[in-house]
């Protein structure tokens, strides 16, 4: 809507023509970004020009964190400085230590993302985090580093408390991924397991304008504080059609059980029109490059679960080609993510929280970028109810 002044000084309201977007905003470009892109038809995505898959193969999680926040990959000196800056931020603020046991056992069912959101909000209050609108770029960056460094500590502490265990203090000498596994289990992980989780985290740290990233940026456009934006992203990620699927994809393999049951189990679901968790993606029309990377990692670890997953993938593709010709459906990131996390000893209730540990870094980079734009995101909706105005009945 715009306002124009007509002759004589009177103001007239002129409606801006509405633009109808496709359902789900599919393919609609809503802003410019320098953070990365997903090219679904090519099966490729990148972070600031670098192939995300190549980064996962060659660099550390801290390097990618630095890339998203500062715009370039660090050299050895910058990496050491970044680690020295972020490692102390892993430690719990004293005021949270009494609150976490309450949050961890706040309901009969584990809701780790909801508990994380509450804990993050409490941490923001303890730190005195202010709205993005009122901060300098340097202050926003400090808040982003604080929140993203603290997330793994909060997640692991909440998980252990929920199961009657004491939280494990973070170690400044361990990498982000190794420290996460250490705080979760209490044991220093093997190099292979730490690297496998690190590659998973890198591959999922950002992925275009998905639902949770868009949610975080919408909140950022209001000028709210950074943690409020992250909590909104967590809410979106908790949905089973977004981040809540890794454990469900692994449940599929559990239900199949053995290779000889794959054909009958999958055919029954396909013919019934059921969704097969771990397959299909809103953007990719060919193999998800993250799935390809994680399959390679899983195959490097080996075992019966990996063999079943690989065989299941091949047979699903073949059965769909037979029963639904012309409909291509490939594994997405959740399918092999569940396998890799299972092999690395993560409990299933921590699969989606581990995804969140990575994605909070990507969200924060998006929030910092959005905070430089003063325009609030405010789309419209088409009213389709009965014609107004309807007379209001008396008494």
Image: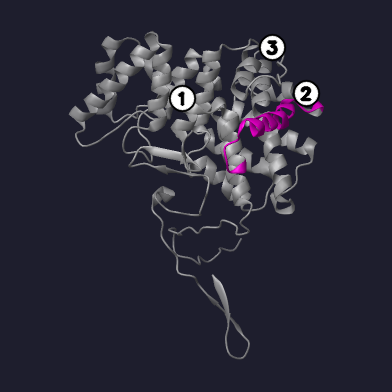
* Labelled pair 1, 2 in contact (Cβ < 8 Å): no
- Residue at horizontal 57%, vertical 45%? 366
- Residue at horizontal 74%, vertical 34%? 122
Q: Which residue is mark 2?
A: 97
Image coordinates of residue 63 in percent, x first then y, are 58, 32
Image coordinates of residue 212 in percent, x first then y, are 53, 40
Query: Which stretch did the figure color magenta?
Result: 70-94
Q: Could you tell whether 310 is left or right of 178 in the image? A: left
> For the C terminus, which image quadrant?
bottom right
Determine whether the residue tagged by mark 3 lies in a helix, strand or loop.
loop
Determine whether the residue tagged by mark 1 lies in a helix, strand or loop.
helix
Which quadrant of the figure has residue 256? Answer: top left
Q: Which mark is residue 48?
A: none
Q: Which residue is mark 1?
A: 246
**Which numbered disc, 3 or 2, marks the residue that appears first in the sequence?**
2
Which quadrant of the figure has residue 268? Answer: top left
292 over 66 or under it: above or below: above
Image coordinates of residue 142 in percent, x first then y, are 72, 40
The image's colour scheme reads one colour
Q: Could you tell whether 81 is left or right of 383 in the image? A: right
Distance between the Cα atoms at labels 3 and 1? Answer: 25 Å
- Residue at horizontal 58%, vertical 43%? 71
Q: Could you tell whether 114 is left or right of 243 in the image? A: right
141 over 295 or under it: above or below: below
**Which numbered disc, 3 or 1, marks the residue that appears first in the sequence?**
3
Dot 3 crowding, Cα within 10 Å, few <14, some 14–19, many 20+: few
Q: Is residue 256 among what the camera can see?
A: no
* Labelled pair 3, 2 in contact (Cβ < 8 Å): no
Q: Which residue is mark 3?
A: 165
């Amino acid at each position: 809507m715009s306002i124009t002044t007509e002759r004589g000084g009177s103001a007239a309201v002129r409606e801006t023509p509405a633009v109808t977007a496709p359902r789900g905003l599919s393919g609609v470009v809503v802003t410019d970004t320098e953070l990365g892109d997903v090219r679904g038809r090519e099966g490729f995505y990148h972070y600031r020009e670098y192939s995300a898959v190549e980064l996962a193969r060659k660099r550390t999680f801290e390097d990618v964190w630095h890339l998203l926040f500062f715009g370039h990959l660090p050299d050895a000196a910058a990496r050491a400085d970044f680690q020295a800056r972020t490692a102390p931020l892993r430690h719990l603020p004293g005021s949270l230590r009494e609150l976490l046991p309450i949050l961890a056992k706040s309901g009969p069912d584990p809701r780790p993302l909801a508990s994380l959101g509450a804990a993050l909000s409490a941490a923001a209050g303890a730190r005195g985090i202010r709205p993005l609108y009122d901060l300098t770029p340097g202050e926003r960056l400090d808040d982003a580093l604080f929140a993203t460094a603290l997330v793994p500590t909060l997640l692991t502490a909440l998980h252990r408390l929920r199961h009657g265990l004491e939280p494990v203090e973070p170690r400044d000498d361990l990498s982000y991924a190794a420290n996460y596994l250490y705080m979760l289990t209490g044991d220093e992980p093997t190099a292979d397991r730490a690297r496998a989780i690190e590659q998973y985290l890198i591959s999922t740290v950002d992925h275009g304008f998905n639902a949770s990233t868009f949610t975080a940026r919408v909140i950022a456009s209001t000028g709210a504080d950074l943690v409020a934006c992250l909590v909104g992203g967590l809410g979106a990620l908790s949905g089973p059609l977004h981040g809540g699927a890794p454990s469900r994809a692994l449940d599929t393999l559990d239900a199949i059980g053995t290779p000889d049951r794959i054909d009958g189990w999958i055919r029954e679901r396909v013919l019934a029109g059921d969704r097969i968790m771990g397959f299909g993606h809103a953007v990719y029309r060919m193999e998800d490059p993250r799935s390809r990377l994680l399959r390679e990692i899983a195959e490097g670890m080996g075992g019966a679960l990996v063999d079943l997953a690989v065989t299941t993938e091949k047979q699903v593709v073949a059965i769909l080609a037979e029963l639904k010709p012309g409909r291509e459906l490939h594994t997405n990131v959740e399918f092999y993510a569940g396998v890799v996390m299972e092999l690395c000893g993560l409990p299933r209730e921590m699969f989606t929280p581990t995804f969140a540990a990575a994605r909070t870094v990507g969200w924060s980079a998006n929030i910092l970028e959005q905070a430089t734009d003063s325009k609030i995101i405010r789309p419209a909706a088409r009213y389709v109810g009965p014609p107004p105005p309807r007379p209001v009945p008396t008494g």
